[in-house]
């Protein structure tokens, strides 16, 4: 609050009165109190940034031998990571001693560029991406609510026609390689991601490919 202090006037020798002089003093106490109240309010009502957590599907531990008649991996892709190298194959793995109808599994090398890994995932997961594009148009046209879009997209990524990704690494793979791969998988709107151990036959095939 502002206060006005009178300095007091006085007469001169001839009896003339001088004008009173006044000085102002601003009391800052209420303003400081208000500032602290506002600061406390914003601190208590603000939402602090939360760490972003990526959900991954881990396979259950199995102590018994795997059933030979177990369900096969449909519409799936498996990535084998080594140091700054990424290879993949689609479908089931067939070693040289147990080849499939098209022979043993062969690895295909790609990279982490937009024309490499991202294109591979986009082509294989076109079922989800094309339908997502249609839903985005409906959201922009206000024909679909944001919450409904999010729910439908999650359901779409879990359908059997959607691509599933298995990630396997050797002891030379870098954490950066794994994170880069998962980032590309999320960009491609793939909902099922499972880090699993590498089979001995897969590791042998990977080592053979690295020597080329």
Image: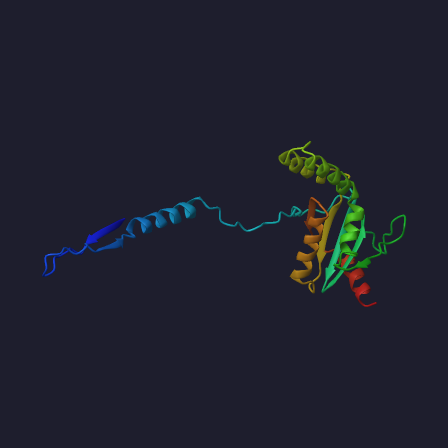
Residue lying furthest front: 14
* Front-lying residue, 203 or 57: 57
Residue in the picture at 68% in, 57% down: 180
Tell me the quadrant of the picture where the C terminus can be found.
bottom right
Residue lying furthest top: 143
Q: Position of residue 59 (x, y in %)?
A: 67, 47
Residue lying furthest right: 102
Q: Left or right: where does residue 154 sit relative to residue 204?
A: left
Q: Is residue 182 above or below residue 45?
A: below
Residue in the picture at 25% in, 54% down: 24
Q: Left or right: where does residue 146 sit relative to residue 162?
A: left
> Is residue 111 visible in the rendered structure shown here?
yes
Residue in the picture at 66% in, 57% down: 179
> Is residue 71 visible in the rendered structure shown here?
no
Q: Position of residue 154 (x, y in %)?
A: 67, 39
* Front-lying residue, 176 or 80: 176
In this picture the colour scheme is rainbow
Residue in the picture at 46% in, 46% down: 46
Q: Position of residue 40 (x, y in %)?
A: 38, 48
């Amino acid at each position: 609050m502002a206060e006005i202090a009178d300095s007091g006037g006085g007469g001169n020798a001839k009896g003339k009165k001088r004008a009173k002089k006044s000085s102002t003093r601003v009391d800052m106490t209420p303003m400081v109190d208000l500032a602290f109240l506002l600061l406390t309010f914003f601190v208590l009502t603000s939402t602090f940034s939360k760490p972003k957590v990526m959900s991954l599907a881990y396979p259950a531990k199995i102590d018994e031998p795997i059933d030979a008649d177990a369900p096969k991996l449909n519409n799936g892709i498996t990535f084998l990571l080594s140091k700054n190298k990424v290879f993949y194959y689609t479908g089931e793995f067939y070693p040289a001693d147990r080849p499939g109808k098209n022979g043993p599994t062969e690895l295909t090398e790609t990279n982490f560029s937009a024309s490499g890994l991202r294109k591979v995932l986009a082509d294989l997961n076109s079922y989800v991406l094309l339908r997502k594009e249609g839903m985005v148009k409906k959201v922009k046209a206000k024909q679909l609510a944001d919450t409904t879009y999010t729910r439908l997209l999650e359901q779409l990524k879990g359908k059997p026609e959607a691509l599933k990704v298995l990630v396997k690494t050797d002891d030379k793979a870098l954490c950066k390689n794994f994170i880069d791969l998962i980032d590309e998988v999320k960009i491609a709107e793939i909902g099922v991601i499972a880090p699993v151990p590498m089979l001995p036959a897969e590791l042998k095939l990977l080592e053979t490919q690295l020597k080329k």
